[in-house]
Amino acid sequence: MIYRIIQKRNIFLSISGLLIAASIAALIAWGLNFGVDFTGGSFLEAEYANYQPSITEIQNVLKDTDIKGLTVQPTNDNTFILRFKEVSEDTHQGILAKLGTLTDGHDGATFKELRFDFVGPSIGQELKSKSFNASIIVLIMIILYISLAFKRVSRPISSWKYGVAAIVALAHDVIITLGAFAVMGHFYHIEINTPFIAAILTVLGYSVSDTIVVFDRIRETLPKSNDNFENTINSSINQTISRSVNTSFSAILALLAILLFGGSTIKDFALALLIGIFVGTYSSIFIASPILVIWNNKMHKAAKKA
């Protein structure tokens, strides 16, 4: 069965256009709910001896304290790192008292605060800047890589246009993922921290890899095809669509398991990957290749007018 994906490109592009418009509106109206990593806050390192509470126990015991944006991260040295918004000294002492109660009922168990620091917003701004720069570098490298990989493809469109089409698809993925987190940050108070940046960069890599699979099949099919460019691309997509969907479905199942049963420290990371991979699979099939066709058709129209 041949799916007429390219022939129905206006439907898929319209869906993406609506999602991008909604995402941009959410970002403008609510913005992203940045966490302690970006806005600054308190950093507490605690050590438990002869007993190791779980992350859930620590989170539960601190529910009644006046802290916001709490994240708990275990280390390899049997300590825990707690990050949260800036608090007063009274609240700090209350947190220590609550954490100390976790040793009750455990013979020989002790609790000790190893460090308590404040991370200023200037560090958060530097982190934002570095995250943005890292994303830009990744996008530039992707364009260069695709341009080199497809340098032998010159007809009917130049190789660098494959890179541009891939970048448009990546922008589509990132904007929709950011928009989803703007909505969830506003209604469900989900915060953006450094794991989210790692998830976005992972999505960029996954999405462009999926797009290249389609483009590579187009590159292989073009010299052998007697059909027009539009039908050749549609045939290439149909040959790769099952691989893309099956690969993404497997990854999504694993991420759903992490989201449902994993620890709270990794759930936001898994959620970002889940949204990004789903949208990335959609864009590699329904966005990147149709852009090539639209570009080619406009070139032909311009040539005819000339």
Image: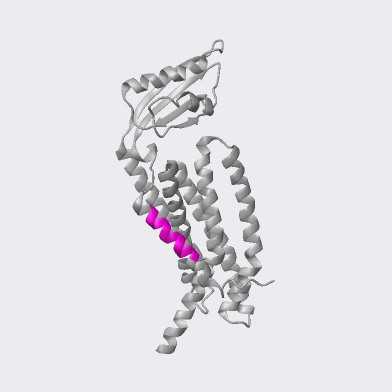
Residue 137 vs residue 271, the one in the foreground: 271
Main SS, magenta region, reads: helix
Looking at the image, residue 101 lies above or below residue 293: above
Question: In which quadrant will I find the C terminus?
Answer: bottom left
Q: Position of residue 277 (x, y in %)?
A: 55, 54
Q: Residue at x 56, y 10 (%)?
A: 107
> Quick check: can you spot residue 93?
yes
Q: In this view, does 52 lie to the left or right of 45?
A: right
Q: Where is residue 208 in the image (x, y as percent from the top left)?
A: 52, 59
Q: In this view, does 34 lie to the left or right of 148?
A: left
> Residues in magenta?
15-26
> Quick check: can you spot residue 140?
no
**Way the structure is coloured:** one colour
Q: Is residue 127 left or right of residue 164?
A: left
Q: Residue at x 50, y 43 (%)?
A: 269
Q: Position of residue 33 (x, y in %)?
A: 39, 43
Residue 71 vs residue 218, the one in the foreground: 71
Q: Residue at x 41, y 31 (%)?
A: 83
Q: In which quarter of the image is residue 41?
A: top left
Q: Does the magenta segment cover residue 16?
A: yes
Q: Does the magenta segment cover residue 179?
A: no
Q: Which residue is drawn at 59% across and 66% down?
A: 214
Residue 18 vs residue 280, the one in the foreground: 18
Looking at the image, residue 263 lies above or below residue 104: below
Looking at the image, residue 97 lies above or below residue 72: above
Q: Residue furthest right?
A: 1
